[in-house]
Image (cartoon, rainbow, N blue to C red):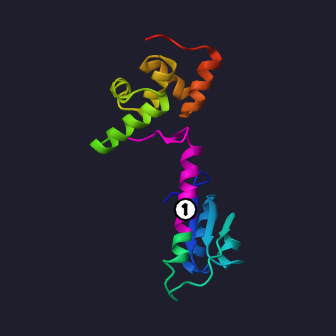
Amino acid sequence: MHLNENDTVIALAASGRTPYCIGGLQYSKQTGAHTAAISCNKNAKISDYADIPIEIEVGPEILTGSTRLKAGTAQKLALNMISTSSMIGIGKAYKNLMVDVQPTNEKLRNRAKNIVSRAAQTDVETAAAFLDQSKQNPKIAIIMITLQCSYDEAKAHLERANGFVREAIKLADKEGDHHEQ
């Protein structure tokens, strides 16, 4: 898998003692990867092998032996929180919108138009036109509309801001770097 210090491995074990998961964490640490463990028991054995132990006490399952009910649901919720906060942390969100959508089909093209419209506070037709000008890149379209700048300028702003729309707009505002189209 070529794990390294830039990776994070999350092991899931409802019981908190699954040997395969513990072995995965041990291997991951040898590669320098960060580790986390999500279990559904307090003081779980797997927690001893993770940089970040997450122990969600759900109590006994309603149907004994079926960890897909409480434990599986709790772990899924934890993973949803981790993946959502990760997407925010790497610049895939702006305001409360996931702006790094790739409009590769009709449904996603409509989603991208609506996202650009909401983020840039414009109508859907304007959003669609700027999406076309931005080579179907919602982040760049948002910046183009908000800063009233060209594709190349918006792309440069976004690159300077390491892919963060909010930061790109803030930096351009600070520098007074707006241009009429």
Crowding at mark 1 (Cα within 10 Å: few <14, some 14-19, many 20+): some
Residue range in magenta is 75-103
Look at the image and tell me whether residue 81 can be seen.
yes
The furthest residue to the left? 106
Q: Position of residue 13 (x, y in %)?
A: 57, 75
Q: Quadrant of residue 90?
A: top right
Residue 15 position by quadrant: bottom right
Magenta stretch encompasses residue 102 = yes
Residue 103 on image: x %, y % = 34, 39
Q: Amino acid at mark 1?
A: Leu
- List the residue tagged with mark 1: 79
Residue in the picture at 34% in, 28% down: 128
Viewer-proximal residue, 109 or 91? 109
Up/down of 86 relative to 144, above or below = below
In the image, farthest residue toward the bottom = 64
Q: Residue at x 48, y 17 (%)?
A: 148
Nearer to me, 125 or 26: 125
Query: What residue is at 60 percent from the left and 75 percent from the top?
Result: 22
Q: Quadrant of the C terminus?
A: top left
Q: Which of 116 and 177 lies nearest the eye of the viewer? A: 116
Judged from the image, the secondary structure of the residue bearing numbered disc 1 is helix
Does 48 sit above or below residue 6?
Answer: below
- The answer to whether residue 92 shows anywhere in this view is no
Residue 44 placed where, x, y %? 68, 78
**Residue 101 relative to residue 107: left or right:** right
Q: Nearer the viewer, residue 117 or 3?
A: 117
Residue 24 x/y as whole percent: 56, 70
Quick check: 88 left or right of 150? right
| Residue 91 is covered by the magenta coloring | yes
